[in-house]
Amino acid sequence: MKRLRTFLLIASLFLPSVAAGDMLVGGEVSYPTKKGDCLVLIGAKEGLDWEIIAKENRIEAKNQCRINVQLTFTNRKIVPRVVEDGIIVNIPDRMLYFFKEGTLVSYFPVCLGSRDWPTPLGTFVIMRKEHDPTWHVPKSIQREMKEKHQTVKEVVPPGPDNPLGRFALETSLSGILIHETIWPTTIYQWRSHGCIRVMPENMEGGFFDLVERGTKGEVIYQPVSVAMTEEGRVFLQVDRDIYRMVKSLDEEARGQIERRGLSDKVDWTKVEGVVKAKSGIAVDVSP
């Protein structure tokens, strides 16, 4: 694991500097529950940890969710990098942002690699688009299947049991796909073998159709983001340092605020609270 962290840190040093887009998305949400909902699934759809939804709505268990109940919560995010065209995936944020001609045309939560199977950082290109893909199981995952006493599979054909779902985008990052998932409750978590899983409703008839072969993208690692609105309000978002690449989130937050010249425009007690919570929600830290 130490060698892995060293590799990821070196990779991050070669990324271009992150441009502050000062773009906020999401906000206050009123969510009517329906049949089949549970807090984990709602969090996966909305880009929010289920514990936060439970706390804000005084619900005790993640599977406790009655039908036709109006839940309220905030899922505001700071877009970590703004580009003219392409895909940005921020690992700590667990979000994918897709731009075309300078416009953010879609954004949604994703599932990314676990600590043991990290999603690699770096730039990539969409090499191929596949509808009803066949999964050629990597040797490493076959070994894991064997260790877990599961049936070892070399090839999984298209169908409802294929983990790649119905839509897959092959990237130039070795072995990394952006694909639909048959396990929607894993979205907005770090549970894949490195691939980027997407909720079915975000893939079909939207993102998959809009993305073209040759589309450029980048996987970045930015657990702290700062933005200032046109009205002069300062927002801070702090996510968990899941791959343990940042020495101190507190120092990172303070450094970003100071470099932006916003030290006198924030309430440092609020800043401390946001860093401690690591909620992944953009919070107004203005005085």
Image: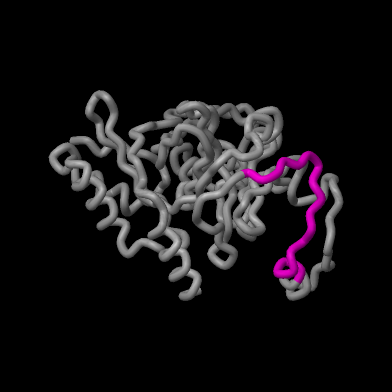
The vertical placement of 100 against 240, above or below, is above
Is residue 108 within the magenta segment? no
Q: Position of residue 169 (x, y in %)?
A: 68, 44
Q: Considering the image in quadrants, where does the C terminus appear? A: top left
- What residue appears at the point 23 percent right and 51 percent down from the top-left corner? 254
Residue furthest toward the left? 264
In front of the other: 44 or 80: 80
- What residue appears at the point 16 percent right and 43 percent down from the top-left corner? 263
Determine the image quadrant of residue 150.
bottom right
Q: Which residues are magenta?
A: 126-142
Q: Position of residue 171 (x, y in %)?
A: 63, 49
Q: Position of residue 78 (x, y in %)?
A: 39, 38
Tell me how many marks there are: 0
In front of the other: 193 or 29: 193
How is the rendered protein coloured?
one colour
Q: Position of residue 14 (x, y in %)?
A: 41, 58
- What residue appears at the point 84 percent right and 67 percent down from the top-left corner? 151
Is residue 130 within the magenta segment? yes
